Image (cartoon, rainbow, N blue to C red):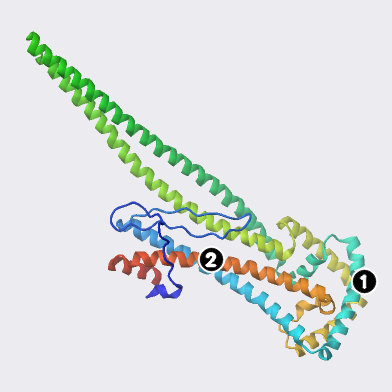
């Protein structure tokens, strides 16, 4: 059975939870949970689907499968970054646990690197506008910064598009709700008109009967005219009522489609906001423009550093010593400590580095939990449908088997 790929412990539906009021085996309303985070909290709406309709059911299952695939892709990317951050934290633990006598040469090399770096930073702070934290990050991820700038801009542009889509979908849903209220109002008006006309026709009929029996007046022509008028009015009312019912069915389908699109856009919005937040924290910037500016300053600084050959040579010598000592301690990611040598000699700086890595890992874990929740919720929904009928189970297995 394909559902066991992702499914964890089945969640029970709380007592009193509302479901869709459609007859015979409806699909309960689905709400994908969104973590409560400041600035990106969104609550997805419930999608109404009648699983008795083959086309609607298969389309709904396909949408659930697409949501699972998107969440899996997000989880894969997040896990790679999470593994790298975890590796850095393990290296810090190895350094902390090493005996002091084994770290003497490491501390000496790190101290010389810190002193040489201070000399260079004195000139750099006068000429270039970037913080020490930004400098360290750019040194660690220099090769990937141009690509990250492009991605950062794409995410920002995509954020604008998502917000526009959310506004547009919100307006569309409001219009559809207004249409539903208008249809209901027209239907009520037809009922009222029908009742009033029925009373009037009854009064006219009573009056004609009175004329017939009391005054022996010939009422054949008025009676036929009245009957014809009643048939015409009834036909008009029934025709309008039929149009209203058709309009209500069409409007309900449009509302269901708008809810589905809104849920999809909201999930993309949350993932996009989290990605932007992570990249901003990673590079210590507010947006892609600032990152591009800081990276430009960094490249200018590098050209200046190239002129400081003697200092560079001395740094390289100590960096080699540092790398050898780190290798001897079993550190995997040794190169990043060139830019963080101060953390090796200053416990407070090491605490800051560890805190920064923990914050990054927590952000990744929250995003991973969110996408895992999306997968579990979709799979539970597919499991619920699968258990309804054997033919539903075959459809679910076929879709998951792709």
Residue 214 found in image quarter: top left
Q: Which residue is painted at 49% across and 56% down in the image?
A: 264
Query: Which percent across, then down, holds residue 58?
Result: 35, 60
Residue 369 found in image quarter: bottom right
Q: Indicate the secondary structure of the residue bearing disc 1.
A: helix
Q: Which residue is painted at 43% across and 58% down in the image?
A: 30
Whether pointer 1 and pointer 2 mark residues with C-beta atoms closer than 8 Å, the reply is no
Marks 1, 2: nearer the viewer:
2
Numbered disc total: 2
Q: Which residue is mark 1?
A: 119
Query: Which percent across, then down, holds residue 400?
Result: 40, 70
State whether residue 218 appears in this view.
no
Q: Which residue is mark 2?
A: 371
Quadrant the N terminus occupies: bottom left
* Closer-to-camera residue (386/167): 386
Q: CA distance from mark 1 to mark 2?
A: 46 Å
Q: Which residue is painted at 86% across and 88% down in the image?
A: 105
Left or right, 94 with respect to 246, comes to right
């Amino acid at each position: 059975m394909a559902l066991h790929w992702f499914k964890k412990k089945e969640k029970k539906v709380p007592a009193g939870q509302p479901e869709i009021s459609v007859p015979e085996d409806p699909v309960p309303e689905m709400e994908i949970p969104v973590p409560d985070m400041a600035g990106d909290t969104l609550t997805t709406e419930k999608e109404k689907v009648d699983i008795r309709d083959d086309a609607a059911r298969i389309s709904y299952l396909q949408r659930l499968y697409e949501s699972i695939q998107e969440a899996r892709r997000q989880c894969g990317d997040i896990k790679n970054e999470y593994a790298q951050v975890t590796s850095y934290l393990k290296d810090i633990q190895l350094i902390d646990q090493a005996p002091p006598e084994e770290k003497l040469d490491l501390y000496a090399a790190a101290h010389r690197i810190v002193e040489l770096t201070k000399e260079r930073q004195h000139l750099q702070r006068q000429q270039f506008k970037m913080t020490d934290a930004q400098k360290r990050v750019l040194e660690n991820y220099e090769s990937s910064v141009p690509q990250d700038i492009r991605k950062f801009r794409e995410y920002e542009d995509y954020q604008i598009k998502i917000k526009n889509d959310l506004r547009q979908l919100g307006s569309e849903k409001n219009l559809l709700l207004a249409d539903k209220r208008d249809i209901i109002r027209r239907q009520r008006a037809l009922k009222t008109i029908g009742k009033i006309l029925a009373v009037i026709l009854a009064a006219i009929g009573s009056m004609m009967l009175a004329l017939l029996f009391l005054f022996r007046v010939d009422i054949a022509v008025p009676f036929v005219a009245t009957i014809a008028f009643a048939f015409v009015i009834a036909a008009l009312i029934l025709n309008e009522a039929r149009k209203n019912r058709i309009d209500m069915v069409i409007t309900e389908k449009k509302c269901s489609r708008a809810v589905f699109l809104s849920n999809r856009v909201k999930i993309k919005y949350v993932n996009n906001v989290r990605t932007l937040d992570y990249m901003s924290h990673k590079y210590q910037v507010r947006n892609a423009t600032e990152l591009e500016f800081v990276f430009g300053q960094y490249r200018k600084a590098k050209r200046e550093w190239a002129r400081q050959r003697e200092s560079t040579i001395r740094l390289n010598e100590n960096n080699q010593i540092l790398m050898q000592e780190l290798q001897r301690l079993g550190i995997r990611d040794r190169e990043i400590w060139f830019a963080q040598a101060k953390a090796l000699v200053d416990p407070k700086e090491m605490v800051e580095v560890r805190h920064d890595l923990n914050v990054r890992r927590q952000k990744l874990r929250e995003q991973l939990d969110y996408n895992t929740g999306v997968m579990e919720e979709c799979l539970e929904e597919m499991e619920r449908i699968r258990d309804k009928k054997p033919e539903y189970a075959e459809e679910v297995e076929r879709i998951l088997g792709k």
